[in-house]
Image (spheres, rainbow, N blue to C red):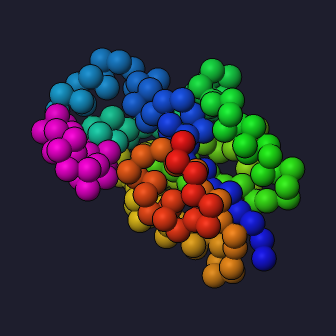
Amino acid sequence: MRTVAAFDFDGTLSTRDNVVPFLRGAVGPARLLGALVLVTPVLLTAVLDPTRRDRAKAALVRRTLTGFDAARLESIATRFAADVYAHHLRDDMVERVAWHREQGHQVVAVSASFRDYLLPIADQLGLDAVLATELEVVDGRLTGRLAGANVRGPEKVRRLEAWLGGEPAELWAYGDSGGDRELLARADHPVRV
């Protein structure tokens, strides 16, 4: 039976949340601030009711990235990933990834962060897969919608199970928030960071 280590990213592998800093880098502080003001009611409901966080994230993406050039976003994501890798990774978790790799375990990121910037980071860390939130692109432009569900809560387990393909696995899981609860519950070896 194979062994898999599944890591959340924001707050677990990374020292911070990365979604808002990424959006700021993509659209600039003025446009981000305008979007935050427009979606404030949705954001407030998400603070009071965490089950509405997916709706809040979708509203923010719609207000910031609709019509954005996909190739330009890829370039921004690559630069953003380099900065996160250089300045915002947790040394203890990077060491834990290395330990799992040395043991011959498969290592995956399972995150609500955007796949666009997680892929280059995963390449540098030697991860086997990135199961993360994706942005919908049509004809080279972002639609302002997510391509599939936001990868948090039960969606983390659904994505991981799909990636496992029904094969049994001994699972280590690392997470830091309520959005990781189901992933940690699914694990043979849950580690709250």
Residue 75 in view: no
Above or below, 189 relative to 88:
below
Above or below, 161 relative to 103:
below
Quadrant housing the C terminus: top right
* Residue found 72% across the figure and 55% down from its top: 107
Q: Is residue 45 left or right of residue 188?
A: left
Magenta region includes residue 175 = no
Q: Nearer the viewer, residue 64 or 150?
A: 150
Percent position (x, y) of residue 75?
60, 31
Residue 21 in view: yes
Magenta region includes residue 44 = yes
Percent position (x, y) of residue 10?
50, 39
Percent position (x, y) of residue 79?
62, 26
Quadrant housing the N terminus: bottom right
Number of marks in the image?
Answer: 0
* Residue found 69% across the figure and 70% down from its top: 170
**Main SS category, magenta section:** helix
* Residue found 16% across the figure and 38% down from its top: 44
Percent position (x, y) of residue 134?
49, 52
* Residue found 63% across the figure and 30% down from its top: 89
Q: Nearer the viewer, residue 76 or 111?
A: 111
Q: In the image, which residues are magenta? A: 39-59
Q: Residue furthest left?
A: 41
Q: Nearer the viewer, residue 12 or 35?
A: 12
